[in-house]
Amino acid sequence: MKGWRRIALCFAVLATLPLAGCWDYQRINFREQVIGVGIDPVEGRSDLYRFTFQSPVFTPAQRGGAGQTSGEANSTANYRNLSVVAAGFNEAVTRAQDQTDRALFLGNLETIVINRRLTTAQIQTLLGELVRTMQTGSTTVLVASDGPAAEVLAIRRDTAPAEMINRYDDVVKQVAHKTRSMLWEFWRDYLTEGQEPVIGMVCAEGDHVDFAGTLLFSGTRPVDELGVDDTLAYQLLVGKARRFTLRFTNGEHPFSLYFLRSHTRLQCDWRQPGQDLLSAHVKLQAILIQDDQRWTHAISREQLRRYEEIAAQDLARRLNRTLAQLQRDGVDVAGFGRRVLYAHPELEHQLDQRWPDRFPRAQRDIRVEVHILQKGRIV
């Protein structure tokens, strides 16, 4: 009896070995960690795309030297690109796998760059496949390039371009002239009534990536672009703008404000066609950086109020101009229609049918408040 117990105990111990999680262990240097994907059209072939897969390459550094002891290891990160032509994303992954002896891994995918010259049908097909691909991460950033996406991913720097684009908002706290949109956010806005998607624009400039504005969509169809100034107005409209500086003019004398944060309250009053009211109440907190007297005179509270009024009027004009452009383009990227559904869920069917016609004809009510918290520091 004791012998059978010992045998059973041995089998039980052996059965628990896979539970340690090492049965599917794979060394990291046997993986091709894909961190970026660029997608370009193929000239003359609407059914094909050119995919560029970017992955880091870790090269062991020389041992020894100052500050190193025997047996220490160090590595220098670089990257490489694989290019394939395929009819879809998953087929491209299969073809790219044939070009490397490492297993492609998409769980760390950071950035997808799509060429804005892709057709509406191509973009819709691609995004649908990407969203359904469980291997891609939920935090993948989606951007559009005005030129070839392969050129953006080919910038030669120590840091991979895909990583540079993804980590921008984590490192730089300023939100002003750049739009950040993740893959899941684009698909969410595409499926949401009363909301159209946007993605940021990038381009290759020498040895760095330049954030060039915002690309507006109607569904999955690119409609228009916002320049850097109108992108700032869009960020104010949706309440995301923070930590940026603007210059204003008091008569012939300029002054500058550093804006810490913004808060926006959007509302849409559903009335008769042509009488719908798009309301935006924007509040900003700022610090006076440069006054029109160049610090030669003490600044009174009345003068600060004057600065607040001038800045509020200027920003209100910018917001009105940008919202008017969105109405001309017929793209409600700020989500006014979604506010209608929040207040009146029963209007969902009407909104789906009528909002594309009513949004361009709606009236605008933009109010901006600027509060200068302090006059800055003089050491």
Image: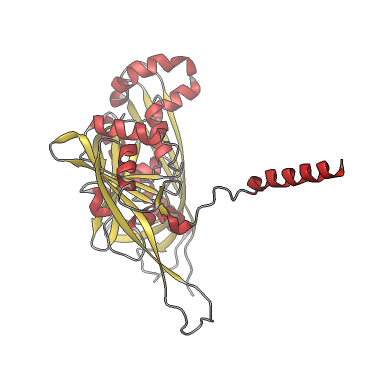
Viewer-closest of 71 and 47: 71
Q: Quadrant of the N terminus?
A: top right
Seen at 31% across and 29% down, the residue is 219
Residue at the left extreme of this rendering: 44
- Which residue is located at x 44 percent, y 41 percent? 135
Please report the residue visible at 35 percent of the width from the left and 42 percent of the height from the top: 234
In the image shown, does 361 or 9 lie closer to the viewer? 9
- The total of numbered circles placed on residues is 0
Taking 178 as reference, is 266 above or below it? above
- The answer to which image quadrant residue 224 occupies is top left
Spot occupied by residue 276 in the image (x, y as percentages of width and height): 36, 22
Query: Closest to the observer: 89 or 269?
Result: 89
Between residue 149 and residue 19, name the one nearer to us.
19
Q: Position of residue 364 (x, y in %)?
A: 34, 31
Horizontal and vertical percent position of residue 185? 42, 37
Residue found farthest to the right: 1
Q: Give above or below for 282 relative to 67.
A: above
The colour scheme of the drawn protein is secondary structure
Image coords of residue 337 (percent x, y): 40, 26
Residue 328 seen: no
Residue 256 visible at all:
yes
Examine the rendered structure and indicate whether residue 269 appears above or below residue 170.
Answer: above
